[in-house]
Amino acid sequence: MHLGAIDWGILALYLAFVLAIGIVSARRTKSGSDFFLAGRSIPAWVCGLAFISANLGAQEVIGMGASGAKYGIATAHFYWVGAIPAMVFVGVFMMPFYYGSKARSAPEYLRMRFDEKTRALNALTFAAMTIFSSGVSMYALAKLIQTLHVFDAPFAQMGLPQAWIFHAAILTSALVVLVYIYMGGLRGAIYNEVLQFFLIVAGFAPLVWLGLRQVGGWRGLQTTLGPSYTHAWAGMAHASTNRLGVDWFGLVMGLGFVLSFGYWCTDFLIVQRAMAADSMSSARRTPLIAAAVKMFFPFLVIFPGLIALALTSAPDRVGVHGPVAAPPPATSQIATIAQHEPGVIPIKMDSSTGKPMLDAKGNPQLDYDLATPNLLLRYFPTGMLGVGLTALLASFMSGMAGNVTAFNTVWTYDIYQAHIRPKASDEHYLMVGRAATAVGILASIGAAYLASQFNNIMDLIQLIMAFVNAPVFATFLLGMFWKRTTGHGAFIGLLTGTIVAALHHGLTLPLDAIVGAKGGWLHVVHTYPSEMAQNFWTAIWAWTACFSVTVVVSLFTRPHDEAELVGLVYSLTPKINGKDGPWYGNPLILGGIVLVGAVILNIIFR
């Protein structure tokens, strides 16, 4: 792939802006509060865009495109069922606790509500999750650079193996993110996330428009792919009749409740953006502003995967006038086509052997993660290609930065200050936070290589969330809304939920998967139709175990005095009057409008 001078210029301009934002932010980063929480001085609209952009990393831009190609428009459930309700809930009900308690992190809220051991357990598991998530972004970026082949010639001239391009891309992206987070902290990350948001829209809206023209619009996709790919609720009555491999209960409970609320309501990576707002009102509006925008993101990030699949499954039948009716081939048939025809989605190759990766049945696996990048390369001319590639790079590095800023905060306040050096100066903790940034980047590099074992990074992300966010959501839910919950109950319940998640994963395996990173490492007692189905049920089991054990242990242990829980538990906290001011400043009205919009979209694409 050859990039023109204008493409390289756009990429260079973006990198210059990224570093400039870090330099400017560094001038206002004088204390720990500035570095970890941006001094709580960011306007609501900026926090809202950062709130959504922190989630708009590689796992969304590449992962949702990959899932669109693998599972169809049902992937939109991650938005209209698995995001919007939870975003409304955190804005209306939970932000008053986070922001009002003056907690510097989500684990610190658990200390204030329960005890130190509960905070420590959540901090450790969350820190591990941020490292894995940052590693996924690194992997996706390196995979993209390798796919473009833009550095093939320079590496050949230096006599270096082509495989080293992957490693060089990981190290380069790590260095750029390290520089601007080390300098500007959370403020630098937030303003870079806002820049990334506009780049994503500018880069992907034209891609979807050009791709839809090529396949004959939405009707053309329906004709080429069939209803199982183009109807979100088709076949949800039973797990075996839809591509996600999960029935409606598993979808609603596993994704719509446990994983969704566990992520948007308790994941400090997300909550941290709202906590940087300049007021309580701004903090509550932050997730609602983000939800209003996020409703429409399936059209930007999922549609490229559907278009790529249509062009892969019917490369000779799709033209400028739209597709000719043809039955959609099975996945193994698509893999065969991709191996012999000029489709958009290629076969996934083993980086060590250079041979196609096979499933348990010996069929070649499609590399769904390349659906969106390859579509971009196919349709964008010089200039626009630079914008599209910059949008991808921005999403990858922003995803890395978001996880690293969350990691350095939790490490510094919830692990280092709490258990290693509790009474140091603010300047010392600022230094530790910057050192933690470097450590987090190094650990993320290792996680990037683990991500290469999955052909859809969204599957890996949901698995990690099932281990970490699912049980902790039960802990937060009981802690905020049941004053009888005790510290011992919260700790034992959280630990039990995490162990149950590990046991469930070790005893189950997705269909056609090989025992190992994808499960079955203890013994295979059950097989799920897909990796996503396994993830949903891992989350359900983890949440249920944590919730049940927490309730039982709490009933047999001594609760906190009610005076200690004011501002931390819903029934003991003065209610905030959200009726003052204009209607667009009222969280209840904004939340209601967003929920109605999500219902309408579910009906349209049912």
Image: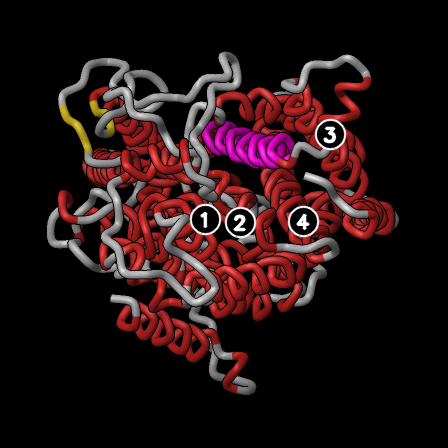
Q: Main secondary structure of the magenta part?
A: helix
Q: Earlier in the sequence, mark 3 or mark 2?
A: 3
Q: Which residue is mark 2?
A: 375
Look at the numbered discs 3 and 2 and tell me whether their residues touch, using CB distance below 8 Å: no
Outermost left residue: 238
Name the spot of residue 151 as percent of width and height, x first.
73, 29
Of marks 2 and 4, which one's residue comes earlier in the chain?
4
Residue nearest the viewer, comparing 492 with 71 = 71
Q: Of 195 and 389, which appears nearest the observer?
A: 389
Give the foreground label among 2 and 4: 2
Q: Which mark is residue 37?
A: 4
> Can you say which quadrant of the picture contains the C terminus?
bottom left
Residue sitting farthest toward the bottom = 582
- Disc 2 from disc 4: Cα separation: 38 Å
Is residue 554 in view from this perspective?
Answer: no
Give the class, few, some or many, for how many residues have Cα within 10 Å of label 1's Cα (few <14, many ≥20): many
Report if residue 164 lies within the magenta region.
no
Does 401 sit above or below residue 351? below
* N-term-proximal mark, 4 vs 1: 4
Magenta part of the chain: 123-147
The residues bearing labels 3 and 2 have C-alpha atoms spaced at a distance of: 20 Å
Label 4, label 3: how far apart the Cα atoms are: 38 Å
**Which residue is the extreme one toward the front?**
316
